[in-house]
């Protein structure tokens, strides 16, 4: 019987490990940086987590903008409307 296990790194949900009853662990990624890990198998959950951490370190995080123009982590100021008058 297969069992799914939530996988988090540094408190962020990155995907789900699928325990295939002794046949190793598969992975379903929700973070774009980990798409290359999907469809592969690992002998242990620890080895899957290690591969995920390594992949996340090798690629910069995608920054998403909120509806108000701020970066999702709050690191930037809101965007100001353009006041280009063309003069």
Image (cartoon, grey):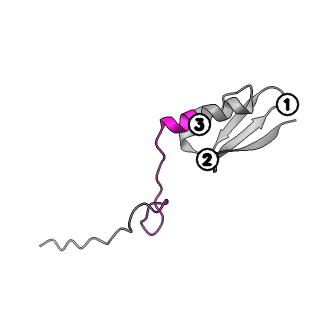
The quadrant of the rendering that contains the C terminus is bottom left
Residue 66 in the image: x percent, y percent? 48, 64
Q: Is residue 28 above or below residue 79?
A: above
Res 53 label: 3
Q: Residue at x 76, y 37 (%)?
A: 18
**Label 1's element?**
loop
Q: In the displayed image of the protein, which residue is found farthest to the right?
A: 1
If you read the primary sequence from the N terminus, does the residue marked by circle 1 or circle 2 appear first?
2
If you read the primary sequence from the N terminus, does the residue marked by circle 3 or circle 2 appear first?
2
Q: Quadrant of residue 34?
A: top right
Q: Quadrant of residue 32?
A: top right
Residue 43 in the image: x percent, y percent? 74, 25
**Label 3's element?**
helix
Q: Is residue 19 left or right of residue 84?
A: right
Q: State if disc 3 and disc 1 touch (CB < 8 Å).
A: no
Mark 1 → mark 3, Cα distance in angstroms: 24 Å
Query: Viewer-proximal residue, 61 or 41?
Result: 61
**Label 2's element?**
loop
Q: In the displayed image of the protein, which residue is found farthest to the left?
A: 87
Res 21 label: 1
Res 10 label: 2
Single out the mark in the foreground, 1 or 3.
Answer: 3
Mark 3 → mark 2, Cα distance in angstroms: 9 Å
Local crowd size for mark 2, using a 10 Å CA cut-off: few (<14), some (14–19), many (≥20): few
């Amino acid at each position: 019987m297969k069992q799914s296990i939530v996988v988090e790194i540094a408190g962020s949900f990155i995907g789900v490990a699928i325990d295939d009853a002794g046949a190793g662990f598969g992975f379903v990624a929700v973070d774009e940086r980990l798409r290359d890990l999907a469809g592969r198998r690992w002998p242990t959950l620890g080895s899957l987590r290690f591969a995920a951490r390594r992949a996340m370190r090798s690629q910069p995080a995608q920054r998403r903008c909120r509806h108000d123009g701020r970066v999702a982590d709050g690191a930037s100021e809101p965007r100001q409307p353009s006041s280009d008058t063309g003069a």
